Amino acid sequence: MPDKSLFIEDEEAATASVVLKLRSGKWLSQNQVNGIVHLVSSSVPRLVPENVTVVDSNGKLLSGSKEQSAFGTLSSDQLEYQAKVETTLENRIKSMLEKALGPDKAIVRLSCELNFRQQEKTEERFYPENHVVRSEQYLNEKTTEPEPMPEGVPGIRSNLPQENPENKVTAVNTTSEKQDRTVNYEIGKITSRILEPVGEMQRISVAVLVDGTYKRIEKGEGKIEWQYIPRTAEEMQKLENICKRAVNFDAERGDQVEVVNIPFETTTLIENQDSGGNEGWLARLKAYQSYVKYAFLGLFLFLSFVFIVKPLIRWLTELSVADMEIVKQLPKTVGEIESEFGNNAKSLSFTDQASKLITNDNEASVTVMRDWLKEK
């Protein structure tokens, strides 16, 4: 915090430095770093976010660099967004091809070029044909003034003074008229402020590998051979058109889509087909793996109820005479003892109830009295 000054122009801004201790293998996104910067700057007066420096425990600068390089402008969020777009388009093509050709029959790789440049454009256009009269002014002047007109014989002698007194000058009225019109037009104009979208798609490149079909040929002595059959040109053209439709192909921006038909590795295919008679039921069982799990759980609960819960309930409810005698010898609660005496016993005093209890069970009463005498 700098010292306060009497003059505003002499005041210095506050600064802050933050060191983050991160766990091993962990990192922060740019949004999280910006959140820390704005939290610190909002907590301190005269502290702007540009004056907050954030570094991690390894000395890596996370925020506070006033001079950013061209590489620094491409943040991790932008790279993450580009990877997400590429993965989405790849899955769109791959899921469609696998539904048509079968699983593991197509390999798709896609690369896109995005424009992350932030651009703002202000455009002003005039339309001369779209004009409207804004103002109009008329001016009309008319004047009449006498003007002398010479008369006589034309020539030099007649114009000399005192040479020809017969020359006369007569006055003639002259009229002048002046008209003026001023019209101001308003020309049509459109002013637009355009913010160019960030992350606009500029170019897409798609590479697709498609496997062909295989024909099983049985040879002598139980040997099996698989013959590769390439796909026709018509099929490849259809697959290419499908891929173009899936990624919104645009030839004007330079998009490229290439679909190639080559044989894939067939070792796994041959091994699976050779052991298909023995492992066929296992493959079918894996298809219903989610349902088999719930079936085993239901069977376990049913067997637990039949062999554990049900016998336990039967043993608790069906007691023999000997078991009843054993239960009778167990310690009784106060409520059970009171119920043995009936409702009339509740009206007796505590002394009478204790006397009646001792009378009914002499042996237990004697045992209790002996225990009392043994205690200190």
Image (cartoon, grey):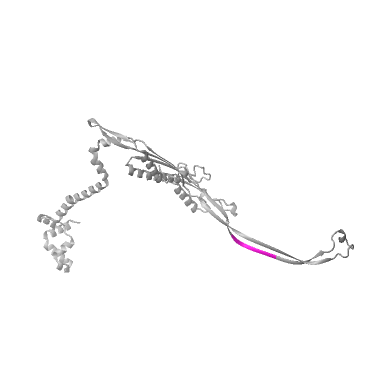
Spot the residue most to the right.
Answer: 162
Number of numbered markers: 0
Q: In the image, residue 314 lies at what x, y percent? A: 14, 54
Q: In the image, residue 249 lies at what x, y percent? A: 43, 45
Q: Residue at x 10, y 55 (%)?
A: 322
Residue 117's place in the image compared with 278, above or below, is: below
User: Is residue 39 toward the left or the right of residue 191 in the image?
Assistant: left
Q: Closer to the camera, 151 or 240?
A: 151
Residue 98's place in the image compared with 337, above or below, is: above
Q: In the image, residue 241 lies at what x, y percent? A: 39, 43
Spot the residue most to the front.
Answer: 153
User: Is residue 354 toward the left or the right of residue 20 in the image?
Assistant: left
- Residue 275 forms part of the magenta stretch: no
Spot the residue most to the left.
Answer: 321
Let me know if residue 271 appears in the view: yes
Q: What's the magenta region?
A: 132-140
Q: Closer to the camera, 153 or 226?
A: 153
* Predominant SS of the magenta segment: strand
